[in-house]
Amino acid sequence: METTINDIASKHLGQSGSYAVYTDKFDSSLLVAMPRELARKDWGITGKEFVGVDTWHCHEATFLLDNGLPVAGTLKISYDASSEFMVESKSIKLYTNSFDMCKMGATLNTAVDNYTNQIKKDLSELLQVSVDVKFFKEGMDKHETAANPARGYEDLYSLIDLELLEKESFTDYSAKEKHLKIIEDKQDNTYSVYTNVLRSRCRHTKQKDTGAFYLKIKLKNAKLDLLSLLKEVISLREVNEFHEFCAEKLFTALKSHPEVEDCCVMLLYSRRGSWDINPVRATSYDMIPTVLKNVYHYTVKQQGQ
């Protein structure tokens, strides 16, 4: 039997037509709400340990004007981490894809308003919380509110002695151990650090999710063992969990130490299926960068996003 290109491609890409959208009508029934409690209870988290936001960017958002002219740009949504539900990532991908061939208005401004208002309505009703939505037709180099949420952070690899990194043993990739060490010190210490080796796996599909971990933390009469922090992040490497709960696990591990006065954990995940997911958990909303919690600011993409 003759082997075709489609036969070869379908081995890993799925069945032909499985991702196709042949419709000129958006479909809000594609959206799926997921109770946060279901995953939190696995980690002993209640949701009262922090405040936070979940900010998402769709860098492939597109729809049509009534005359058939395509419009494309970046869609940004944000909603509070205190919500009972969060949106399932594959469902929002399929939902936003359903707008691709939809005629949303006669003029650009009208179409953008109709597009964002519809998404805000559908997501807010689904999640039973107010969801902020903004569409950016122009990119970071054109938009006056463009800002980098990760400015001023230092790479953990540059702060830890290279010889120590090369000699140390890294064996926990399933979060089986507690690695964090807070050391008594004679002074307060503040850190703004990151690493781009963040990796976990999707709880459902087991696909890898990569990104960067950012931490801003203030300690009272203590200092942070940076190698232990790196090990804590690395321990997520083979953990099957959604992005939001990886952020909550890291935050609660840090906040369990009484020396921690203020803390903000940001996980800026790489784009997969047109969306990137950016969960942020903190001791107060003031710790969260405005550019992430305010959808009217265009978020500059980080490495890999």
Image (tube, helix red, strand yellow):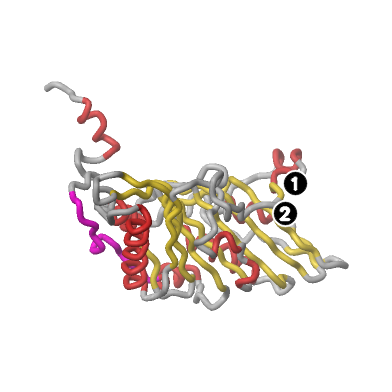
Picture residue at 58% right of the left edge, 62% below the top: 250
**Tag count:** 2
Say left or right for 13 vs 4: right
Say left or right for 163 vs 24: right
Q: Which residue is mark 2?
A: 226
Instruction: Tell which of 24 and 71 is nearer to you.
Output: 71
Kind of element beneath mark 2: helix
Q: Which mark is residue 26?
A: none
Q: Is residue 34 visible?
A: no
Amino acid type at mark 1: Ile
Q: Residue furthest left?
A: 1
Magenta stretch? Answer: 23-35
Picture residue at 39% right of the left edge, 50% below the top: 206
Q: Is residue 63 visible?
A: yes
Instruction: Tell which of 58 and 194 is nearer to you.
Output: 58
In the rendered view, would you say 167 is above or below 73?
above
Residue 23 percent coordinates (x, y): 18, 50
Residue 291 percent coordinates (x, y): 58, 59
26 magenta-colored = yes
Which is nearer the N-term, disc 1 or disc 2? 1
Q: Which residue is mark 1?
A: 160
In the rendered view, would you say 12 is above or below 149?
above
Residue 236 percent coordinates (x, y): 53, 54
**Is disc 2 surrounded by few (<14), some (14 to 19) or many (20+) residues within 10 Å?**
some
Look at the image and tell me in which quarter the N terminus lies: top left
Mark 1 touches mark 2? (CB < 8 Å):
yes
**Is disc 1 surrounded by few (<14), some (14 to 19) or many (20+) residues within 10 Å?**
some
145 magenta-colored = no
Instruction: Give the distance between the C-alpha atoms of the residues marked 1 and 2, in whole angstroms.
Output: 7 Å
Q: Residue furthest top?
A: 2
Amino acid type at mark 2: Leu
